[in-house]
Image (cartoon, helix red, strand yellow):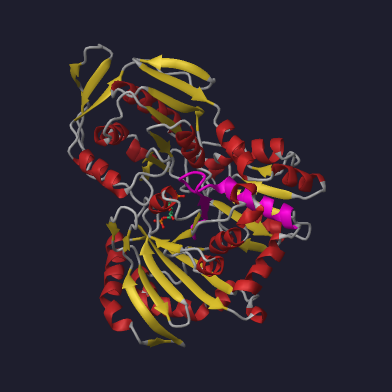
Amino acid sequence: MSRKRTRIISLGADVSIQTLATNAYPDQQPGTSGLRKKVSVFQQSGYLENFVQSIFDVLDGCTGQTIVLGGDGRFYNREAIQIILKMAAANGIGKVLVGQNGILSTPAVSCVIRKYHAFGGIVLSASHNPGGSDGDFGIKYNIGNGGPAPEKITEAVFARSKGITQYKISDAPDININHLGTSRIENMQVEVIDSVADYAEQMQQLFDFDAIRNMFKRGFTMRFDAMSAVGGPYARKIIEDLLGAPRGTVLHGIPLEDFGGHHPDPNPVNAEELIALMDAPNAPDFGAASDGDADRNMIVGRKLPVSPSDSLAILAANATVAPGYKKGITGIARSMPTSTAADRVAKSLGVPCFETPTGWKFFGNLLDTNQATLCGEESYGTSSSHIREKDGLWAVLFWLNLQAATDKSVNTLVAEHWAKFGRNYYSRHDYEGIDTVKANALMDRLRNKLDSLKGQKLGSHVVAMADDFSYTDPVDGSTSSKQGVRIIFTDDARIVFRLSGTGTVGATLRVYLEKYEADPSRHNLPTQTALADLIAIANEIAQIEAVTGMTQPTVIT
Ligand code: G16
């Protein structure tokens, strides 16, 4: 699209606040977690500004309020921070708490919003998506509870962005965000805060740091792969400085604008270096990783990546070992595609287990009303009511606390859990970069088959129910439909199909596969072997190869 340059159309009473004309972009609809696009898209004239102005335009009562601002340090983070600070000042925001060097992990933003009772916050991140000048950038708004804005707000921002004609910005010079301290833009105060301190303080309230410190003193070894992303400074401060793990425990601990060219998504495919370390004969006791904005986590025992669904279930079953959860949990919430391992734990604890659509925003109301304490998703996200985002380092500290309290390894804890609750074999197959039209057609065809599936025998499995998942929030009554096609079998096996809402190129088909095995003598099969018949059924029913031309998924988690 050719775009005319923005021009000044009016000057406010304070001559340095400008109102600039802009042309609307039609593609600013937030996805699963905010607006994510290629950096080059965000660098178009007025692109970031339009979205930020749309946020300010739909926020009732933000004048004079405090907001939090920070990002994962990826390419374009610094420029975006300066633009947003000047726009916040021009839009009457009272104060911005900004992370030093523009750095705040996503969980830290949530923590800081809650601690200082801020009105909301702006997170600059495309999370686990690759960074750099040809990588991805992203922005999302979090509300006063510290969590991602609900769909009511994201839809209003999108609607506003489609009709926007102007935005407000101060022409003040850039603020120095490298040093802690306070300065002003127009009438707005800017406070540069320590990126780690508030978050580290909260972690010390939740977990038994003495017990973990003693475990490290006794020679316990771990490697935490921060993937050259924002988790590095947090992990170094907490794991190496406060918990006394030796220097070098945190790998790739310096955040880089392009994440060192790596894909900062902590799964066995992208964190292959950590997986190789944990597979080696001299492996450390414990391995962990976090993603671009440090809200995702991967937990690894010796030769054993723990599935995120199992991690949620195991933490829930053992929650009371951590001081912050010693009174127990009120409930668990998981996204629909996440395995039902947590449901079995909830049942044994006598607490509810909620099934929500994919997207952390759906947990907010359950946490706010204390109906759930722990939440998790198959996409390597786990967290609790301490904030309203998923929290990578929190999960790692919880596992450290669990190992310190029980003196058991990850492998033993996992094996004991399966022996008690049974094993939910689980895997996700991603088919990336599919033509969007073809991907939507594949989903439509699946939806059309749903009514005829019930009672059918597919392989050795009989379909108990098949639907397109729809969720009604028990707190505010809002409904979200078309959240994924699920086929549930009478033996509790499940196949779920949905399209990713976080990608920036074409469409990604996600196929989620789950099979329950109660018999401990069958708990050590390779996951893909255990799921082989379901994989074949999924391919057959969705005609994946015929539609995509792909014989294999591009990612298997
Ligand atoms: C985001 C959301 C998660 C969601 C994940 C995957 O994670 O916050 O709730 O599970 O995307 O979503 P999709 O399957 O639509 O790609 P993150 O870490 O990218 O913010």
Is residue 310 highlighted in magenta? no
**Count of all numbered marks drawn on residues in the image:** 0
Q: Position of residue 358 (x, y in %)?
A: 40, 58
- Near-viewer residue (207 or 391): 207
Residue 142 appears anywhere in the view: yes
Identify the residue at the far right of this view: 218
Image coords of residue 341 (percent x, y): 53, 68
Residue sitting at x 64%, y 68%: 417
- Relative side of 229 to 69, left or right: right
Q: Check the image and report above or below for 492 versus 400.
A: below
The quadrant of the image that shows the N terminus is: top left
The location of residue 520, given as percent across then percent down, is: 65, 78
Residue 480 location, quadrant: bottom left
Residue 271 visible in the displayed image? no
Q: Quadrant of residue 307?
A: bottom right
Is 394 within the magenta?
yes
The image shows residue 549, relative to residue 250, as above or below, that is below
Q: Position of residue 57 (x, y in %)?
A: 24, 33
Q: Is residue 325 left or right of residue 472?
A: right
**Does residue 73 lie above or below 551 as drawn?**
above
Q: Residue at x 40, y 35 (%)?
A: 121
- For residue 93, which quarter of the picture? top left
The stretch in magenta equals: 377-406
